[in-house]
Image (cartoon, rainbow, N blue to C red):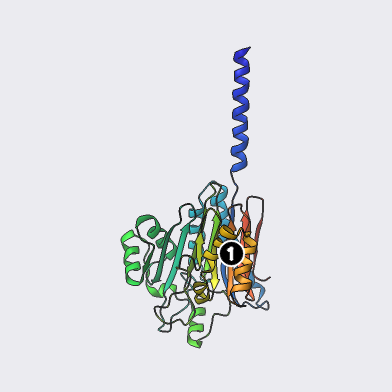
Amino acid sequence: MKHNFLNSIIILILLFFSIQLDAQTNKYTIVIHGGAGGFSKNQSDSIKSLYLNSLKEALKIGEDILKNGGTSLDAVEKVINYLEDNYLFNAGRGAVFTTDGKHELDASIMNGKDLSSGAVAGVTLIKNPISLARLVMEKTDNVLFAGKGADELGIKFGLPVVHNSYFHTDEQYKNFLNGLQKKYAGETVGCVALDNFGNIVAGTSTGGRNYKLPGRVGDSPIIAAGNYADNNTCGISATGIGELFIKHTVAYNISVLMKYKNYTLKQACEEMMYKVLPEGAGGIIAIDKNGNYEMIFTTDAMFRGVANSSGVFEVAIWK
């Protein structure tokens, strides 16, 4: 009798922990953006579909990783790899031109588990800058590499190398010749993910501002400005006028408002986007430690999407 009683107790304990484990698994959230700026609602249905389907594909890549127990770090890198390879967006292939007709790429990634970070600026040869940023974070004692040194580090790590002309697209070249801002597809791509281990990772990658001066660096590779992650608060990826996000350390201040003033994610994001930054500055995507998410922008449009373990799967362009 005593033996049966003990067996019953053990079974109940195992059942309890099994239920707790199930409750903790597959609790994920992922948000993405493909830039904020102007994108007319009068665009053809085919153009709209190109963007929306690309956002869905990027979101699915990240969701599949998280749904199958993968890490937020892998999800963020792979999503941004896809967006860097997609000519529709201003990152990797499809990046804007500098005034001298070249491409200079920036990216950063941050792990909220321990605040480890990696960033690169002025990359000209590495196919996927976000992957180089991850290697900076994981394989060096540094945070930011720039220019020739960043390219050489990528070569040393064995990352795919391309000629600078690989990033060229006819649409961007047309804008370069006209000296115009890109008409659609905003500045920068980004992804923030919370995995079922409770870790938040944020990543951002960009070709910068169209017709930028050679050597100009915006907020995307600047930890605390255009990218930030802390498991105790939130993860943020920004897009827009980089100089403004740098001056106001937007990403870090969202986290700080939550940490020291007990703001909710929504309150902190709205404080920075609506009260600190001017109208039209850009947008942000964010996730807090509980899986709540925000996608706020003050431009006409922001290419964006969200998916989570509760069954949400949405992409959008306009408000």
148 on left or right of 177: left
Q: Position of residue 294 (x, y in %)?
A: 63, 62
How many numbered marks are there?
A: 1
Circle 1 Cα neighbour tier, 10 Å, few/some/many (<14 / 14–19 / ≥20)? many
Q: Residue furthest bottom?
A: 178
User: Where's the C terminus, which quadrant?
Assistant: bottom right
- Which residue in the structure is indicated by mark 1? 285
Query: Is residue 99 visible from the viewing direction of this image?
Result: yes
Q: Position of residue 28 (x, y in %)?
A: 59, 51
Viewer-nearest residue: 246 or 130:
246
34 on left or right of 159: right
Q: Position of residue 175 (x, y in %)?
A: 51, 83
User: Which residue is depicted at the point 53% across and 85% down?
Assistant: 180
123 on left or right of 200: left
User: Where's the N terminus, which quadrant?
Assistant: top right
Q: Position of residue 112 (x, y in %)?
A: 49, 55
User: Which residue is depicted at the point 39% across and 58% down?
Assistant: 135
Viewer-nearest residue: 96 or 272:
272
Q: Amino acid at mark 1?
A: Ile
Which quadrant of the view contains residue 118?
bottom left
315 on left or right of 232: right
Disc 1 element: strand
Query: Is residue 50 visible from the viewing direction of this image?
Result: no
User: Which residue is depicted at the point 59% across and 14% down?
Assistant: 3
